[in-house]
Image (spheres, rainbow, N blue to C red):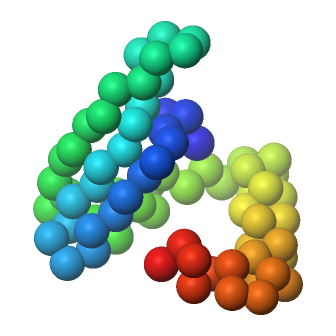
Amino acid sequence: MYFAARRVEIDYINQTIKAEIPVSDYEYTTVNFECQDLDRFLSSCVKTDKRSLNFYQSSLNYYNHVPGALSQVA
C-alpha cells in the first residue's frame, strides 16, 4: 500500500518484483527490480498501524472463505 502499486508480480525463485506504480493521478509506469533478500523486503512493506492490520485481517478472512481464491493468487 505504500506505493499504491497495482499488477504486482513476485518471482520468488529469481527474487524479483514487477509492479505498476503511479506517476500521476491517472498514469502508471512499470518497474522491475531485484531483491537481495525478498522476504525482508516484503516484510518491510507491511504497515503495522491498527488500520492497516485491520485491513490485512479482513483480507485474510475474506480469502479464507472464498473457495479457490488463494489458488488464483498464487
Residue 19 in the image: x percent, y percent?
37, 44
Relative vertical location of residue 13 with respect to residue 30 in this rendering, above or below: below
Please give left or right for residue 71 compared with residue 43 in the image: right
Identify the residue at image location x=81%, y=47%: 51
Q: Is there any visible trace of residue 31 in the rendered image?
A: yes
Residue 11: percent from the left, percent from the top? 27, 68
Residue at image x 40%, y 37%? 20
- On the image, the x and y values in percent for residue 57 come to 79, 68
Residue 31 position, x and y percent, is 26, 37
Left or right: residue 38 compared with residue 49:
left
Q: In terms of image quadrants, where is residue 54?
A: bottom right
Residue at image x 49%, y 39%?
5
Seen from the viewer's position, the closer of residues 29 and 47 is 29
> Which residue reaches farthest top?
24
* The one of 50 and 17 positioned closer to us in this rendering: 17
Asked whether, in this view, residue 38 is left or right of residue 52, the answer is left
Residue 57 visible here: no
At x 83% / y 76%, what residue is drawn? 61
Question: What is the quadrant of the N terminus in the image?
Answer: top right
* Vertical relation: 10 (above or below) 17: below
